[in-house]
Amino acid sequence: MSSSRRGASRVAVVFGLLAVLAIPVDVLLAEYLKGVRLLQSLYIAVPVAGVLALIALAAARRARFVRARSVYAEGGRWPSRFAWAGVYAAVTGGIALAVYGGLRAAG
């Protein structure tokens, strides 16, 4: 196993995990901090989750590229799974904010 492949795989897993956890951590912070409103903090957390997910996708792609050109091209689907989970979390948060905005505009 190449060190650059392990490095890119680890980066993809870490950033994917951070993207998945960005919104729940934001909700907890908004609950415990008095001056932070939940909706305003979500306007920041959802794009942050999206950026982290894109970084994870790029790192997962890099790990897949290196793995494909390696003599030992075994396994390695977890980095892309974590990256896509981060994308899923960011898109779901974006849809939730869009629905909320639509409901506010209609009412």
Image (cartoon, helix red, strand yellow):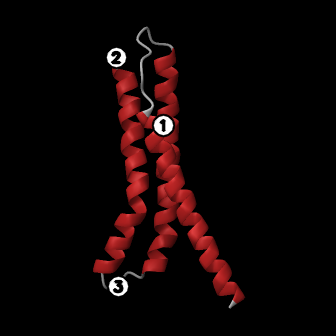
- Residue 1 visible in the current orientation: yes
Which residue lies at the image location 41% right of the left edge and 31% below the top edge?
A: 8
Q: Dot 3 corresponds to which residue?
A: 35
**Residue type indicated by callout 3:** Gly
In this view, 17 is above or below 106: above
Label pair 2/3, CB-CB below 8 angstroms: no
| In the foreground, 28 or 81 | 81
Sequence-first disc among 1 and 2? 2
Residue 74 in the image: x percent, y percent? 42, 18
Give the labeled residue for mark 1. 80
Give residue 94's quadrant in the image: bottom right
Give the label, 3 or 1, closer to the camera.
1
Residue 50 appears in the picture as rendered: no
Q: Which residue is mark 2?
A: 1
- For the residue carrying disc 3, how many other residues have a C-alpha within 10 Å: few (<14), some (14-19), or many (20+)? few
Q: Is residue 85 left or right of residue 21?
A: right
Image coordinates for residue 71, horizontal then vertical, percent: 43, 8
| Mark-to-mark CA distance, 3 and 1 | 37 Å
